[in-house]
Amino acid sequence: MNELRQICRQNDYAFFFDIDGTLATLQATPEAVSIPAPVITHLTLLTQNLSGALAFVSGRPLSQIDELTYPLRGAAAGIHGAEIRTLNGELIATRVDPQQLCEIDQQLSRDIEPMPGVRLEKKSIAFALHYRQAPTAQQALHELANTIVKRYPDFKVQAGKCVWEIKPRACDKGKAISYLMQTSPFIGRIPVFIGDDMTDEAGFQYVNRQQGISIKIGCGESEATHRIDNVTQLYQWLDQLANNNINLDTMRSV
């Protein structure tokens, strides 16, 4: 726990935050998600304290990340790292075959049509099959996603909370954090990554290899080294962290 005490006193850390289920509570649809204004204020203050070494790493596209975190517009990684923006505004995007995207879109749209409650979310170069409102469709959607990636090997299936995602195989959150850590002002700092889902495990693994701090929100198996019980407790911790008054009672080592 000593390394967590040092966060409030040292400027040698870099923070990476997932959004859905971490900075924002999960909702029935992606459009219903929001980050409370006080949390944005605390993130802004923390970003200033860290000289800009704070980034959002999400399955959402960069455009949605910017909407949810407005007016912040710093470093970020969208679509699990398929889109990356450095603090100086440099954009790096994974390229995929547009014809394949069109074919995948058409097949998914056609195959989920007879599945009430299933939602197809299109993320420019990735797709999400949401079944939060159709839990009985989980297995059928998993099989559908696996069929897609067998046909298009440049893509892979990513499990999430009530969602199967089809994303470029070369991308994950660990690689995204690794890339940003090689850019200013992240260079030489200790990475801290906070997430809540299976999509965040690659990020936890990378941070652990760098002797950083990985924090999982909620329960479930994880390679994260620390836990915070829920989003509300994260908000409290973030408030204390932004104001240099960290409270370790909300976090535990695992």
Image (tube, rainbow, N blue to C red):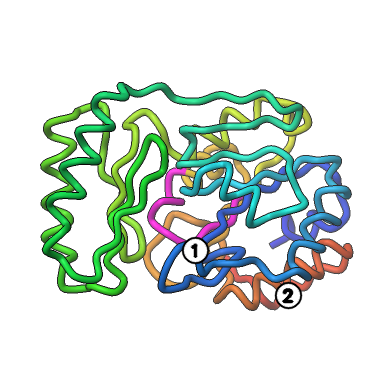
Q: Which residue: 46% across, 48% down?
A: 59
The spot of residue 254 in percent (x, y) is: 51, 65
* 112 or 13, nearer to the observer: 112
Query: Is the residue marked by circle 1 packed among few (<14), some (14-19), or many (20+) residues within 10 Å?
Result: few
The spot of residue 145 in percent (x, y) is: 18, 47
Q: Which residue: 35% across, 23% down?
A: 96
Q: In this rendering, does residue 121 appear at all?
A: yes
* 25 or 28, nearer to the observer: 28
Foreground disc of the pair 1, 2 = 1
Q: Is residue 233 above or below residue 175?
A: below
Residue at mark 1: 31
Residue 116 is inside the magenta segment: no
The spot of residue 75 in percent (x, y) is: 69, 38
Residue at mark 2: 236
Type of amino acid at the residue the image marks with label 2 = Gln
Q: Which residues are magenta?
A: 193-202
Asked which secondary structure carries label 2, the reply is helix
Query: Is the residue marked by circle 2 packed among few (<14), some (14-19), or many (20+) residues within 10 Å?
Result: some
Q: Earlier in the sequence, mark 1 or mark 2?
A: 1
Asked whether the beta carbons under mark 1 and mark 2 sit within 8 Å of each other, the answer is no
